[in-house]
């Protein structure tokens, strides 16, 4: 195991050396307004079921600057909006989203309510306007290319959201592929000590994916980490802000924006 760690560290050092000179993060223009940007985390889950069309509409209607959503592939390569890796089906059986077809996913009742449906990515794009910021978190633990990035980028272009979207992920390889496919698309690396999806779960993964922004868990965000991010000229947002105390902490740390559940939190 020690040998594996040495190998991974060597790969990391080489990657940093190669990419460091070419990494020039782009600061999103919609963060330059002088005010704290508020993004509806999965819409407005304090008002409607998260990651549903109703939740996204309520986030926009209550004045949020934008929305955040989670996208992953179904078994038949449909882009579906759902946060967790697995879901409880109508039969009561727990299944991975990526193992279910879109027709099967459509039958899934959310929170036991058949009126709450898991939407497609295109359904959400249909209800947004070009003034809204859209933060797209890609849910995939795959290191190899599954084409989810390509499919998302194609739809962003078709719907005209290239100038006001951010693509984020805990998976650094996804962010790297986004930049490779379309360098103009804004990206952000998600980081939390509670998400050790990769062997080396440190902010240094940012060197590999070369994001424009750094989105960190509010519970682990401090001035030292903020300073590290700013030295790299990245924007910084924090998630998930659910209390006034957390909101004040975010403001004092000087972040560009927050992901919040309650649109009325001030």
Image (cartoon, rainbow, N blue to C red):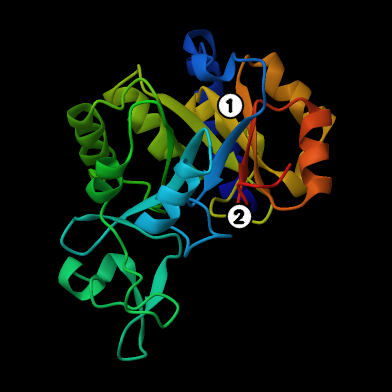
Q: Which mark is residue 195?
A: 2
The answer to whether 72 is drawn above or below residue 239 in the figure is below
Q: Position of residue 110 (x, y in %)?
A: 39, 75
Return the x and y of residue 101 as percentages of the image width and height: 18, 69
Q: Residue at x 41, y 83 (%)?
A: 112
Please name the residue shown 35% across and 88% down the image. Answer: 93
Assess whether mark 1 and mark 2 are in contact (beta carbons under 8 angstroms). no
Above/below status of 196 relative to 220: below
What residue occupies the far front of the structure in this picture?
Answer: 61
Q: Which residue: 33% across, 32% down?
A: 129
Numbered circle sitting on residue 13: 1
Q: In which quadrant of the rendered image does the N terminus lie? A: bottom right
Name the spot of residue 256 as percent of width and height, x first: 65, 25
Compare residues 60 and 223 and report the one nearer the observer.
60
State the SS at label 1.
helix
Q: What's the distance in space between the residues labelled 2 and 1, CA to CA?
A: 22 Å
Is disc 1 surrounded by few (<14), some (14 to 19) or many (20+) residues within 10 Å?
few
Left or right for 217, reference 77:
right
Q: Nearer the viewer, residue 228 or 83?
A: 83
Can residue 107 be spotted in the picture?
A: yes
Could you say which quadrant of the image residue 136 lies in? top left
Work out whether residue 171 can be spotted: no
Q: Secondary structure at mark 2?
A: loop
Left or right of residue 193: residue 156? left
């Amino acid at each position: 195991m020690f040998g594996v760690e040495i190998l991974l560290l060597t790969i990391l050092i080489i990657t940093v050396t190669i990419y460091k000179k070419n990494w020039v993060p782009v600061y999103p223009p919609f963060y330059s307004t002088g005010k704290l940007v508020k993004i509806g985390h999965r819409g407005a889950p304090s008002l409607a079921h998260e990651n549903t069309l109703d939740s996204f509409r309520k986030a926009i209607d209550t004045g949020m600057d934008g929305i955040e959503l989670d996208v992953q592939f179904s078994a038949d390569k449909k882009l579906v909006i759902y946060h967790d890796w697995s879901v409880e089906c109508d039969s009561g059986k727990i299944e991975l989203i990526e193992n279910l077809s879109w027709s099967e996913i459509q039958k899934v009742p959310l929170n036991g309510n058949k009126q709450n449906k898991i939407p497609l990515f295109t359904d959400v794009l249909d209800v947004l306007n070009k003034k809204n910021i859209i933060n797209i978190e890609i849910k995939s633990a795959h290191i190899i290319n599954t084409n989810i990035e390509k499919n998302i980028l194609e739809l962003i272009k078709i719907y005209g959201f290239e100038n006001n979207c951010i693509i984020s992920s805990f998976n650094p390889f996804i962010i790297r592929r986004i930049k490779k496919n379309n360098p103009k698309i804004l990206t952000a690396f998600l980081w939390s000590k509670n998400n050790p999806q990769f062997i080396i779960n440190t902010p240094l993964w940012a060197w590999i994916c070369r994001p424009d922004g750094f989105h960190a868990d509010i519970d682990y965000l401090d001035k030292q980490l903020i300073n590290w991010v700013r030295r790299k000229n990245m924007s910084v947002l924090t998630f998930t802000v659910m209390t006034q105390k957390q909101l004040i902490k975010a403001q004092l740390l000087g972040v560009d924006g927050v992901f919040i559940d309650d649109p009325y939190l001030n």
